[in-house]
Image (cartoon, rainbow, N blue to C red):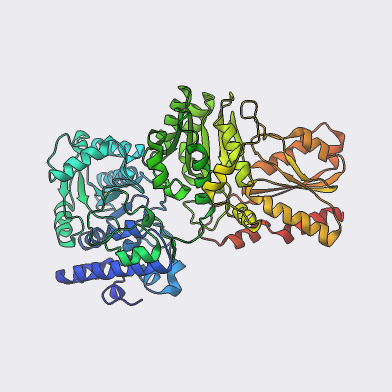
Amino acid sequence: MTAGILGSIHTPADVHALPPQRLRDLCAEIRSTLLEYGRKHGGHIGSNLGVVELTVALHRVFDSPRDRFIFDVSHQSYVHKMLTGRAEAYLDESHFDEVTGFTNPSESDHDSFVLGHTGTSISLACGLAKTRDMQRAATGSSGIGNVIAIIGDGSLSSAIAFEGLNNAAEQGGNLIIIVNDNEMSIAEDFGGMYGQLAKLRASDGTAEPNLFKAFGLDYRYVEQGNDVDVLVDALGRLKDSDHPVVLHIHTTKGLGFSTETMSRNGSDGCSQTNPQPHAGQCEANHWQDPDSSLGKPLDARKYYGQMAMASLERRFAQEPGLVVISPATPGSNGITRDFRERAGAHYVDTGITEEHAAAFAAGIAKAGGRPVLATSATFFQRIYDQLQQELALNHVPATLLIFGAGISGTDNTHSGTFDMTMFANTPGVTCLAPTGGEQMLDMLAWATGPSDHGVVAIRMPGEQILAMERSASMAFDPSERADAHETSVDITGDCPFMRYQIVRPGREVAVMGLGNTMPLAAEVAGRLSDDDGIDATLIDALQYSTMDGELLDVLADGHRVVVTLEDGQLEGGWGEKVTAFYANSTNPKAATVHALNFGASKEFTDRVPLAELDERYGLTVEAVADRIRRVLAR
């Protein structure tokens, strides 16, 4: 990859020094770089293509890092990184992995926060501006200049964004809030607010009511949000403002994503020949895998998500209260556009509003419906209050499908290792961990059935389970598997998954796998048999919300070692509870049991390869087997 102007940009001062007529050339180079980077590396390409001109204009007008930019979610910060000394990480393939997909102060002083969740930029900006104003009042100066929050219209649906707007108007002082309106969220945008934004766009910002003015905020509108010269002028007028101002700009997400690139990447991205796409057109390009194609096998979350949706869809006609809820990220979890269209009123996208989605689900369940709330483990963290109060405390029959859970090589903002400690330690929540597609469908059928139960969290199978099933020559695609499946459990009674399942009986050593670690558990048992002649008992734990005390007591008779494997944080997790069970048991044989727990350390990890993490945590066949051997040798 080569670049002319971009290769010479090392600091924002270099952007300031460019002749005005070269800004458009710089934008064109950046857009080409993004497209090539996305093809080879992957990432959030659509969101960055839409803010090329805005980011160049920001660095042309303001003086980062004294002037602070807070990019909401920060998945659209690639251009900002290019202009702040990190262009090589996008130009040179050998440096592609040197920067994260989000802002990060450890990379640069130009990044104020580590950000990966949505809706928080205005609140963060309020905090920076508040401290700046207090410093100036006390000493006459501050190291912080203008404070600028950049938030997309999709992120604006988050409750905390409205809380931030409310606070900004009351606080006063210099604060610039840029609303990047590209007429969509990650998928389509939903909510009454978007009709008002459309009226503002259609009226060149003059329509009433104006929700920003209703908060008491000054308001400006720019229709040409992808015109760098227009943006430089508009931002220049707002620089050093003495009061909060909202700058509402109209942009095109994925601008420059051509039909050729779309075909090559298997995406329904945006084309410059269609500069104002319909809402949702760039959904697949929001999170673009490198060199993807329409024929590429589905990943686990999409595969099992499609299977789950297909099984629910069969019931829609007979069950008016069965509703699937997604807070803005449906495609990531196999909730396809075709399914959403067929589902009609049985599907609701609440926008990026996880807290509302959880409370909404509680309301549906309280009225007699059966809601299914599906999102990523990392985003479920945002519903902690609603999980305890509206859902668990009210004992409502809501089903939560947890996608992307487990140890992974993702960035530090999207870890999936913390969900089990949150869900399993909340009273009244049944936490299930299927180890196959058929088992997942049975759990889903029970959770959404007529039995009188509270909240059910199903940790959707991950790549380890999908690989295991593929190796067994799965015969069906996800929809066909769901159509062919007949539920084998009683969905009207108590939970049929609370007892741990002995997959293969043995002696001396019991290896217990939970969810995604079941394939590892089977490998460990096989290694002990092949290398040591130990006929280990293999157990599928099925759930992590309570102990199967009866089976654990049985294991104490004839097993010296009980091993627990879990794909999540070890501290506060399931395995430690097994250890505590034996430590506190009144069964005299329990004192002879040595429990070994394997899981993730309590830490944030940032793009560490999964294989390296497994080695670090001892979650490999050899590491587990060696620890077992050392205990048996005592």
Name the residue rendered at 27%, 77% in the picture. 4
Whether 192 is drawn above or below 92: the answer is: above
Residue 166 % position (x, y): 27, 35
Name the residue rendered at 69%, 54% in the picture. 520
Residue 606 % position (x, y): 51, 58
Whether 563 is drawn above or below 453: the answer is: below
Residue 75 % position (x, y): 37, 55
Whether 487 is drawn above or below 608: the answer is: above
Picture mark count: 0
**Most foreground residue, 609 or 103:** 609
Name the residue rendered at 44%, 45% in the picture. 335
**Most foreground residue, 123 or 269:** 269
Name the residue rendered at 64%, 55% in the picture. 468
Left or right, 175 with reference to 395 = left
Left or right, 390 with reference to 52 = right
Residue 275 % position (x, y): 22, 58
**Most foreground residue, 80 or 355:** 355
The image quadrant where one finds the N terminus is bottom left
The image quadrant where one finds the C terminus is bottom right
Is residue 77 in view from this perspective? no
Is residue 157 in view from this perspective? yes
**Most foreground residue, 336 or 52:** 336
Can you tell which quarter of the image residue 434 is in? top right
